[in-house]
Amino acid sequence: MKISDTNTNILITGAGLCGALLGLRLAQRGYNVNVLEKRPDMRTKIVDAGRSINLALSDRGLSALKMVGLGDKVKELCIPMKARMIHPKDGKVLTSNYSGRDDDYINSISREDLNKLLLDKADEYKKVQIDFKREITSVDLRQGSVDYKNLEDNQIKHWNPDILLGTDGAGSRVRAAMARQRDFFFSYTTNWLPHAYKELRMPPADDGGWRIDKHALHIWPRGGFMLIALPNLDGSFTMTLFMRRKDSPHSFEEITTDDQVTEFFKEEFPDVYDQIPDLLEQYQRNPVPPLGTVRCSPWAAHGKVLMMGDACHAIVPFYGQGMNAGFEDVLVFDQILEECEDWDDAMNRFSIERKPDTDAIADLALDNFVEMRDSVSHPNFQTKRAIEMKLESAFAKEQYSSKYSLVTFPPEGMGYREAMIKGRAQDKAIIWLIDNNLISVDDNAESLLAAINKKTEEVIWHRN
């Protein structure tokens, strides 16, 4: 089927962030696009997405939003976060900038606000039809067709589009269909962390402002568990407690009663305890979702079906890149459509070329969990970050960027895998040089860069 044929009928399963962006972009390309979404329209009814309320929007995601003409509009919904603020138990707060460059920062944004923005933009295009309360009940991979239930009247209907694109999240029905087809040779794993999470809300201050610095992502690292906070436009903070599900005194299984919760927060997060008046009510009410990584291959089937986003590469949230990776999927796929003649080639190429990058960010997200939980308050980590900030403020991105910056504020065209390989090598080089007293933050930037580049090349050479 030719990509140039704009009479192509495309069906997208899922109108979440990735699906809404994908539908919008394909409509801008002139295709006939239908989107089926199980949930009600969040613009007319409060919807429990079952997902994190806040997201960290950064350069990769912003590039995709700029592609569809929303680069400026989305910034109205964002609060810039230029640094991590680390809250040790001793109360001596540490600030660690995300970058040594003033223009590089991440943005706190409401998942719901961003989804609504994408849906509203999609509604501007007559070639997009988004139907809510439509649940996919079965998928025929060979035909590229679906059966779905209209949840308003319980009628089952069949749809046989030209192209089927699955953006139906970590519980994807499209992926499940691939896993069931025995002759498809589909590889699929879900790796669950022993940790889970619980969201809490720190309300605005009495004057309507923010109780803590609104331009930072706040972290309370405690080794085996941690608390983080992201700011909201209304003066509140969305806080997330990451902790083991069980098998630890500090686990959701063990900390259940009001007295236990009170003792836990007073001991571990005393500066937070006094800022959340209804802490006990929230803790007892809010769910404890699991944390897992989805990997699978291939993502494309029979020249008619393709998955994107969490449907094929759900990751844990510790690099703030899940949404950004899904948005970048749409950007990369759009570029591939420009370079291919037919849909089969485009979908297979996307599946093959994109997977190494999404595998890389999955690994990096797991790495960053350990860093956020254990390392951010370590003296050597602080020294390393000070050196990285010095180099980033002195040199252009192409000359030096830290691992975090390579991932989050990448030089143009750098994928996650390249960022991971270079960034990990740089990290090893810098730590080795610090441990052996061969560099310090007081050295001039040129000599620091030369020493780090030399050692990084050695690390990469030994890796290969």
Image (spheres, grey):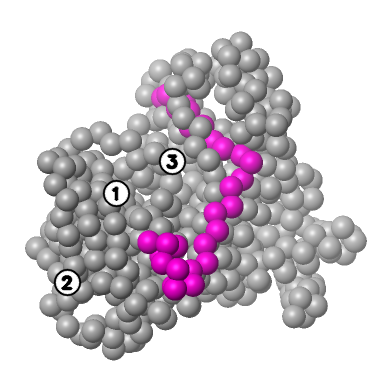
Q: Which of the two labelled residues, at mark 3 and mark 1, occupies the earlier sequence position?
A: 3
Query: Looking at this rendering, what residue extends furthest in the top direction?
Result: 259
Marks 3 and 2 sit apart, C-alpha to C-alpha, by 32 Å
Label disc, if present, on residue 115 of the rendered structure: 1
Alpha carbons under labels 3 and 1: distance apart: 13 Å
Which quarter of the rendering shows the C terminus?
Answer: bottom right
Labels 2 and 1: the sequence-earlier one: 2
Where 246 falls versus 441 (above or below)?
Answer: above
Q: Residue at 64% x, 35% y: name it.
A: 244
Q: Position of residue 356 (x, y in %)?
A: 55, 72
Magenta residues span: 177-204
Please name whichever residue, 359 or 214, is drawn nearer the observer in this view of the structure.
Answer: 359
Nearer-the-camera pick, 297 or 149: 149
Residue on which the image places disc 2: 9
Q: Tell which of 101 and 175 is nearer to you.
A: 175
Q: Which mark sits nearer the N-terminus, 3 or 2?
A: 2
Element under disc 3: loop
Q: Position of residue 175 (x, y in %)?
A: 40, 61
Q: Within the magenta stretch, is there residue 143?
A: no
